[in-house]
Image (tube, rainbow, N blue to C red):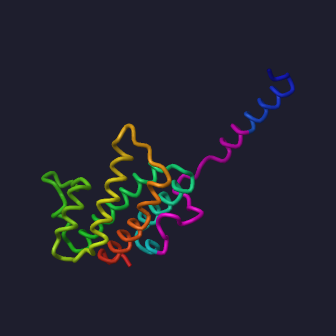
Amino acid sequence: MLNESTTEVLEKVKALNEALRKNNPPPEDTGHSVQQPVVYLSLVSGTRGYIEKLAHQINGTYEHGWYDACAVITRRLVETLIIECFESKGLSEKIKNSSGDFVYLSDLISAMLTEPTWNLGRNAKASLKALKDIGDKSAHSRRFIAQRRDIDRVMQDVRTVVQEIVFLASLK
C-alpha cells in the first residue's frame, strides 16, 4: 500500500503531465520522423507534400512500434503513387469506377500491372502484391497484429515500388 507522501507525489506528477499535455499538444500537422527505416526520404523529397508526409508517417509509426499503422499507411502510399502515375499520363479514367471514384487497391494494382504505357519492372510487380498483402492484413484482419519482422520483410518492396512509381509518374 502506498503511503500518503507517495500518493501525493503521484497525484502531483499526474497533474503535471496533464498540464504539460494541455500546454504542449501534439503537432497539428504531420511531424517529421527521426530516421528513415522504411521509406528513404530522398526517394520522395520534392514530389508532393502529401507524399512526403506519408513517408514521415510510415517511418514514424515504425520508429514507435506501431506496425499495423505502418502497414496501413504504406498501403495508402502505394494507392496514392499508383493514382499519381495514372494522372501524370492523363489516364486516370482507366482507374475510376462508373461513379468517377478511384477503384480499390486490388484493381489499381491490376491496372498498374497491365497498363501498356509503361513497363513496370519484374521486382516492382512482385513487390506491389507483397505490400498489398501486409496492408490488407493490418487493415482488415481482426486477429492479425503486425510485428516488426512483418514490416522488415517488406522494406525492400517499399523501396522498389516507391522508387519505380515515383519515376514512372515523373514526380522526380
For the point 16% across and 64% down, the residue is: 94
For the point 79% across and 33% down, the residue is: 12
Vertical placement of residue 122 versus 76, above or below: below
- Which corner quadrant holds the C terminus? bottom left
For the point 26% across and 55% down, the residue is: 105
Q: Is residue 42 left or right of residue 121?
A: right
Q: Quadrant of residue 126?
A: bottom left
Is residue 66 highlighted in magenta? no
**Does the magenta stretch mainly form a helix, a strand or a loop?**
loop
Q: Is residue 109 left or right of residue 3?
A: left
In this orientation, which residue lies closer to the viewer: 145 or 33? 145
Q: Where residue 148 sits: x, y (%)? A: 50, 53
* Numbered range of the magenta stretch: 17-42
In this orientation, which residue lies closer to the viewer: 151 or 4? 151
Vertical placement of residue 37 versus 118, above or below: above
Total label count? 0
Q: Is residue 64 left or right of residue 43?
A: right
Q: Where residue 69 sits: x, y (%)? A: 45, 49
Outermost left residue:
98
In this orientation, which residue lies closer to the viewer: 167 or 27? 167
